[in-house]
Amino acid sequence: MVMETIKLTQHPDELLPWLANGTLGGTEQQEVEAHVATCERCRSELAWLQSLHSSVAELESASAPGEFGLNRLLRDIRRRPQQADRRRWFAPALAASLAVMALQGALIAHLWTRTENIAPLGRSIVDADVLQIRFEPRATEAGIRGALQAIGARLIDGPGALGIYRVRLDPGASGKPMQMSQAIEILKARPGIVVQVIPESTRTPSAGD
Amino acid sequence: MAKIFELPARSGNDIVLLAEIAGGSEAALAEFYRRYHARIYSFVVRRVHNAADAADVLNEVMLEVWRHAESFQGRSQALTWILGIAHHKSVDCLRRRSPHLELEEGVEDNLEDERDGVPEILMQQQDAAIMRYCIEKLSDSHRTVVHLAFFQELSYTEIAKIIACPEGTVKTRMYHAKQKLKDCLLRASAAWPQSSNEPCT
């Protein structure tokens, strides 16, 4: 991570909240703490942010569903036995590879950079009539529904960790789904609804988290 | 200040746990649920403002974990990954609830950003009802950043991943959120006696 050099003549207002919640580190922490030590205005601001931190901690606790929610979850997944079958042959190799990655992850600092291009989610089965779409955060449900109706598609999965939805092009009156390229052009013509869209069958590296 | 959630270094355990979930282990899923469900629920209920909907979203989040555990590649903390799922599921829930309503973004203009420092009255102990009222008055995007920073105790880098925006946007939203909170707390503190529990109209 590129550390910003903080000019001590400026007040580091944008970094004080992260000092207050204990997540500021490295050079940023050192420089902000050095500034706070000499600035009464920022000491007051930091004290207020720390009291805000305590207040939020007390106010935001909520009664989660607990074991009741877990029972519901387990009941729902047991209704989908076909997914369990797919996992059994998949598990041993995956567990081994992820264990290696866990060791690597503990030794190497990874930098996550936000990419403007989405890549197909890693899936063991890809469908030729499926698109992966990321919608504008402010897109309405009505707008999304209209976009999907325009291409004769329906939601089949999502949103996942990256906010990506999977939609399937259904057969139209002709008995065939709309051509993928035509569907993509129609969706791209709705910039207020769709951020990005790619066919799921595109062969590129997977992007999980 | 004591951490709200005392989590030992679990990143390796979470990776192994998710690998077991990907392999179809219900026991691993139950362990993962017990480990994270309270934090996820707290995040979601603040977004959707409804306990029943929040429970539904929590269930959808955990189902997503069950279906796509193999997609977690360990490049971030498991909590960051699952809160990202929760963020998008919450947005989806709010969309379905109000089909024609655009989700509000934090309005960054027309703010009294000229206010500098912390007025003396705000340094006093704040009434919990007033604080709750002012936090609830924040926009969804501002309230989300405040919750993730001060309840989930996440860094701005982690928050940027969860809500899928640049780190600078996270810092800016936090800046404006705290300015709005100060404004609200000042007005509310003047309007309500500290002993009163009646909300502002």
Image: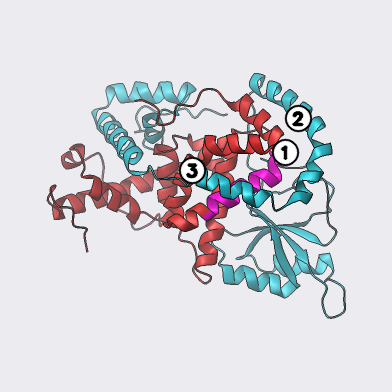
Chain colours: A cyan, B red
Query: B107 and B43: which one is in front?
Result: B43
For residue B139, which quarter of the picture?
bottom left
| In the image: residue B53, left or right of residue A197 | left
Q: Quadrant of the C terminus of chain A?
A: top right
Residue type pointed to by label 2: Ala
For the residues labelled 2 and 3, the Cα–Cα distance comes to 28 Å
Is residue A60 visible to us here? Answer: yes
Specify the farthest residue to the top. Answer: A107
* Picture residue at 41% right of the left edge, 33% below the top: A18
Q: Position of residue A150 (x, y in %)?
A: 71, 74
Mark on residue A95? 2
Which mark's residue is nearer the viewer, 2 or 3?
3
Is residue B168 visible to us here? Answer: no
Q: Position of residue B128 (x, y in %)?
A: 24, 45
Question: Which residue lies under the disc numbered 1?
Answer: B22
Q: Position of residue A111 (x, y in %)?
A: 63, 31
Circles 3 and 1 on the same subunit? no
Query: A85 and A1: which one is in front?
Result: A85
For residue A16, which quarter of the picture?
top left
Question: Which residue lies under the disc numbered 3?
Answer: A66
- Element at badge 1? helix
Q: Which residues are magenta?
A: B56-72
Within 10 Å of disc 1 (Cα), the crowding (few <14, some 14-19, many 20+) is many
Residue type pointed to by label 1: Ala
Q: Are marks 2 and 1 in contact (CB under 8 Å)?
A: yes
For the residues labelled 3 and 1, the Cα–Cα distance comes to 22 Å
Q: Chain of mark 2?
A: A
Q: Quadrant of the N terminus of chain A?
A: top right
